[in-house]
Image (tube, helix red, strand yellow):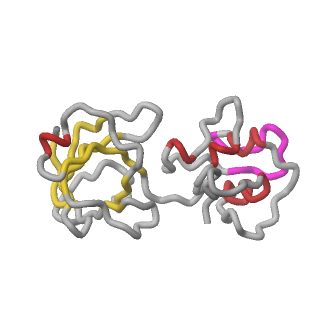
Amino acid sequence: MPCPNVANDEISMLKTGRERTGAGYDSSYSLSTPIYMSDLQRLSGGQSSGSGQNYPAVNTLNPVDNRPDGSNPLQFSEFSEYNQNVTRTAFNYIYDSQSSANACLAGIPSPAPYYHTDVNNLVPDAGGGQYTAYTTLSGSTVVAAGYYSIYSTGNFPSASGKYMQVGSNGAILSIGNC
C-alpha cells in the first residue's frame, strides 16, 4: 500500500521509510534507525545523511505531485500518495471527445493524470488495442472514449507532439502526431 493522501490522513516517518524501501507503507518491515528526512527525500537514494537504512532511488514514475523533489524545504506533503513500487508512468493530457485536432490545440493539460499499460512507460507507440489507458494507477478504471493529446507530468508539463484515440473499453486504438 502506498503512502496515504496527506489531506485525508496523517503520515508517519517510520511508515514512509518502509514505503521508500519498497516493503509497503503499512508493512511491518523493520528499518534500521535513525531515519533522516533528507535520506528519504534524496532522489538518488542512499543514506549519506546518516540514516541506518540505505534507500533506493525515488520512483519517478509517480506523478510529480506524489513524489519528493529532493530540494529544501523538505516536507512530508511531498509523499502524499507516493508509491515506491509504481510500475506505470503518469501522463497529463488535453481531452476532446470528438476530434484529435481539438485535443491537440494549445491549452493547459489536465492536472489529473492517466496511466497506460505500455511496459516501457513511454508515450504509447502503437494503437490497435495493444495498450489500455486508465484513470487510476491500479488499472481499475478505464479513461473515457475520445482523443487525448499527451503531455509529460511535472511542474511544467511538456507536449509529446502525439495524440491517442481511446475506445469505450479504454483500448488505445490509434496514435498520431499533433
Q: Residue at x 19, y 34 (%)?
A: 105
- Give residue 110's position: percent from left, percent from top: 35, 43
- Give residue 96's position: percent from left, percent from top: 20, 48
Residue 53 in magenta stretch: yes
Q: Between residues 26 and 8, which one lies in front from this camera angle?
A: 8
56 relative to 26, above or below? above
Report the side of 105 relative to 157 (left or right).
left
129 relative to 61, above or below? below
- Give residue 14's position: percent from left, percent from top: 79, 56
Report the side of 177 relative to 6 (left or right).
left
Which corner quadrant of the image does residue 29 belong to?
A: bottom right
Q: Residue at x 40, y 67 (%)?
A: 139
Which corner quadrant of the image does residue 39 belong to?
A: top right
Q: Quadrant of the N terminus?
A: bottom right
The number of numbered badges drawn on the structure is: 0
Residue 74 in magenta stretch: no
Q: Between residues 129 and 156, which one lies in front from this camera angle?
A: 156
- Give residue 56's position: percent from left, percent from top: 66, 50
Q: Residue at x 41, y 43 (%)?
A: 111
Q: Residue at x 87, y 53 (%)?
A: 33
In the image, the segment drawn in magenta is 43-55
Residue furthest to the right: 34
Report the side of 99 relative to 133 (left or right).
left
Main secondary structure of the magenta stretch: loop
Q: Quadrant of the C terminus?
A: top left
